[in-house]
């Protein structure tokens, strides 16, 4: 992308604030994983990644390790289509599922491990994966025997390039 995706301007705020509002509405609280100096001004607790260089896995591990709740909603900062309704769908059956992970999937059937609900009981599996340098999140959710939950596929689109961002960026009137 060439710049911090989380701070892209989106619908009168930043992309990260848009996502934080959806998480707040669905789960009741928000914490950010990233560089505290960069995100502290956003008004949410910010925790530095305990395992930088391990990709999203390090961030998920960090989030679960600082959380005080058993179930934790994890959302990547580059999904402009996310809504509180989609996130509530994921949270809805988590405790009753008997699973340690509930992961969003669109109509393609491909899971999105960074739009998911993880139980803190996943921490030992995450720690082992980090130790063994197995950083692929899709492999990890398979190892966790995650339950896939169908959501609106447009909510799962992420932006990684300026061209992808142009599809979501508000157009001048």
Image (tube, rainbow, N blue to C red):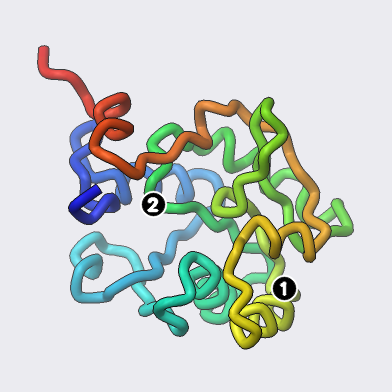
Q: Any mark on residue 77, and which?
A: 2
On screen, residue 42 versus residue 82, left or right, reads left
Residue 38 locus on image (x, y percent): 20, 68
Residue 81 locus on image (x, y percent): 44, 32
Q: Residue at x 62, y 87 (%)?
A: 131
**Hey, which residue is sitting farthest top in the picture?**
173
Answer few, some or many: residues within 10 Å of disc 1's Cα (few below 14, many 20 plus, some between 14 and 19). some
Answer few, some or many: residues within 10 Å of disc 2's Cα (few below 14, many 20 plus, some between 14 and 19). many
Q: Residue at x 23, y 45 (%)?
A: 14
Q: Any mark on residue 112, and which?
A: none
Q: What quarter of the picture does the C terminus occupy?
A: top left
Element marked by disc 1: helix
Q: Is residue 29 above or below residue 109?
A: below
Residue pointed to by mark 1: 122
Q: Write down the quadrant of residue 80 in the picture.
A: top left
Q: Write down the quadrant of residue 47 in the picture.
A: bottom left
């Amino acid at each position: 992308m060439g710049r911090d995706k989380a701070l892209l301007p989106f619908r009168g705020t930043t992309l990260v604030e848009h996502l934080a509002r959806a998480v707040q509405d669905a789960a009741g609280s928000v914490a950010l994983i990233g560089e505290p100096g960069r995100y502290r001004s956003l008004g949410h607790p910010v925790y530095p990644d305990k395992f930088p260089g391990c990709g999203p896995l390090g961030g998920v591990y960090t989030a679960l390790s600082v959380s005080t709740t058993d179930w934790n909603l994890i959302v990547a900062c580059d999904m402009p289509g996310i809504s509180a309704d989609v996130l509530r769908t994921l949270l809805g059956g988590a405790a009753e599922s008997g699973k340690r992970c509930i992961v969003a999937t669109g109509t393609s059937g491909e899971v999105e491990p960074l739009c998911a609900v993880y139980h803190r009981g996943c921490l030992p599996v995450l720690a082992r994966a980090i130790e063994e340098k197995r950083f692929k999140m899709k492999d990890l959710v398979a190892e966790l025997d995650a339950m896939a939950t169908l959501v609106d596929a447009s909510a799962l689109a992420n932006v990684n390039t300026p061209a992808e961002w142009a599809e979501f960026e508000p157009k001048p009137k």
